[in-house]
Amino acid sequence: MAARFIVEADGGSRGNPGPAGYGAVVRDGDTGQIVAEAAEFIGHATNNVAEYKGLIAGLKAARELDPDASVDVRMDSKLVVEQMSGRWKIKHPDMQPLAAEARTVLPRGRVTYTWIPRERNKDADRLANEAMDAGKAGRQWEPRPKAAAVVDEPPLETAAPKAGWAAPADLGTPTTFVLLRHGETPLTPEKRFSGSGGSDPELSDKGRWQAERAAEALAARGSVQAVVASPMRRTRQTAETVAARLGLEVRYEDGLREVDFGDWEGLTFAEVQERHPEDLAAWLGSAKAKPTGSTESFTSLTHRAGVARDKIIARYAGKTVLVVSHVSPIKTLVRLALGAPPDSMYRMELAAASICAVQYYADGNASLRLLNDTSHLR
């Protein structure tokens, strides 16, 4: 399912024309959370040029997250909104190529434009001013680090406080995700691609045994207060086995489902290499590439898994939540917690019914506490 985003964009010029910059934020259309930011000092320009450049940057940032997304653009520039909506003609020669470029970023039918008052566009305005301040200081704007940002390549943290060593007392109790991969299915030991677009297999006898062992281990720990799971059959069966042992209900979250592997569903890696070598090479080389016949990349998975994470944190703040999911979503949540690049997913091993743990703090930091624990299966 394609994402829905809100893009807020703005631009400014100190002199009109004068030193100019733009800012744009991309928000998740369901939660309103900012999932991407963009800003740039563009040199000597007018307000309108800066506003258009902010619009283009915001649309491109949304496209980077999901090329199939629908976008609601919200700006306090009546001129840009009316011109891009087609109600006003674009007469100025500086505006015409910028408007044309904006229209090429995403298909027109997937973008709407809404005017908002300036006070409702504060984040984009702030970024535009930060960009102009950076230009005045002789440098370009750089994003502030965010440990769990939902973007294609989250920045590695350097200056942000590290909650993993010792969280300040005033941050309160962190929200803990106990991440449980589902038990084996008949496809698991054969290492076949098994995503959300295939046969939706159920647990094998060994997989049911693994779910029981996980339930025993988690019951012994006694800390889980809620259970949230992917709605696929293998995760439902795993989650229900554990939840029954814990005396809890299971809440299902579609954002936790596995990637759709398209034409690769049910194939081994070697079979995909033989049948779709170019597509496989592209997929291994870029988080934006999609499996043959699929509509979903790891970039779009990053967005929906991040939205699911934030919804769970908001609902169960300060609690320990068992999250039952699949290899790709769990690896994505781990890499986002670490601020690691997308290709780090290929360097993680997650066995069937393994357990990971991540804690999320009120200041936005996250701490990986456990990875691929299978001690309960020995």
Image: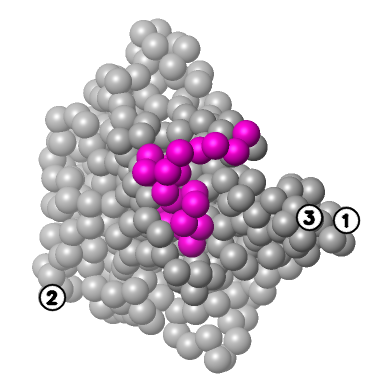
Q: Nearer the viewer, residue 59 or 204?
A: 59
Local packing at callout 1 (Cα closer than 10 Å; few below 14, some 14-19, many 20+) is few
Residue 233: % across, % down = 14, 45
Label of residue 18 in the image: 3
Mark 1 — residue? 138
Cα separation between marks 2 and 3: 65 Å
Asked if residue 196 can be seen in this view, the reply is yes
Q: Residue 247 — which label?
A: 2
Q: Residue at x 55, y 91 (%)?
A: 170
Q: Nearer the viewer, residue 234 or 134?
A: 134
Q: Are marks 1 and 3 in contact (CB under 8 Å)?
A: no
Residue 230 magenta-drawn? no
Q: Gap in Å between the C-alphas at discs 2 and 1?
A: 60 Å
N-terminal-most mark, 1 or 3: 3
Nearer the N terminus, badge 2 or badge 3?
Answer: 3
Q: Secondary structure at mark 3?
A: strand
The N terminus lies in which quarter of the figure? top left
Residue type beneath disc 2: Gly
For discs 1 and 3, the disc positioned in front in the rendered view: 3
